[in-house]
Structures are given as structure tokens and as C-alpha cells.
Image (cartoon, rainbow, N blue to C red):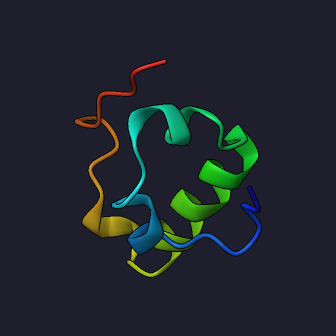
Amino acid sequence: MKFDDLTLEDLKNFSASDFEKIPKNILDNLLKQEMDQFPSHTFDSDRIMWDD
């Protein structure tokens, strides 16, 4: 499975088992791309709960 050209839209069609196969760096890049589209003041980082 090729992950380099994934979009957030693609992730909506993934099953949980497929999702787990995606390398973390690919998911991090997608998240960064999405967050870069919005000004930082729209995110309240103190209220975001990160689940490691």
C-alpha cells in the first residue's frame, strides 16, 4: 500500500486495520498540512487532549 500521496479525505475510507498500517510520519505530515491551513490563533492548544 502506498501512503505518500494520501489525503485526509482518503482516510475516511480506511478501516481501522488499514489505518494502523499507515506510518506515523505520514499521519503527522497530514496533520501538519491541515493545521498549516489555519491561523494558529484558531487552535487552543491548552484544550486539545492528545491521546498517546
Count of labels in the image: 0
7 or 44: nearer the viewer? 7
Q: Is residue 39 left or right of residue 32?
A: left
Vertical arrangement, residue 44 with respect to residue 52, above or below: below
Direction top: furthest residue: 52
Q: Position of residue 50 (x, y in %)?
A: 39, 27
Vertical arrangement, residue 48 with respect to residue 39, above or below: above
The quadrant of the rendering that contains the N terminus is bottom right
- At x 39%, y 77%, the residue is 39
34 or 48: nearer the viewer? 34
Direction left: furthest residue: 47
Q: Is residue 33 left or right of residue 9?
A: right
Residue 29 lies in what quarter of the image? bottom right
Residue 15 lies in what quarter of the image? top left
- At x 70%, y 75%, the residue is 5
Q: Position of residue 40 (x, y in %)?
A: 41, 67
29 or 4: nearer the viewer? 4
Direction bottom: furthest residue: 37
Residue 32 lies in what quarter of the image? bottom right
Q: Position of residue 13 (x, y in %)?
A: 36, 60
Q: Position of residue 48 (x, y in %)?
A: 29, 37
Vertical arrangement, residue 30 with respect to residue 21, above or below: below
- At x 65%, y 44%, the residue is 22
Vertical arrangement, residue 5 with respect to residue 17, above or below: below
Q: Is residue 3 left or right of residue 33?
A: right
- At x 22%, y 36%, the residue is 47
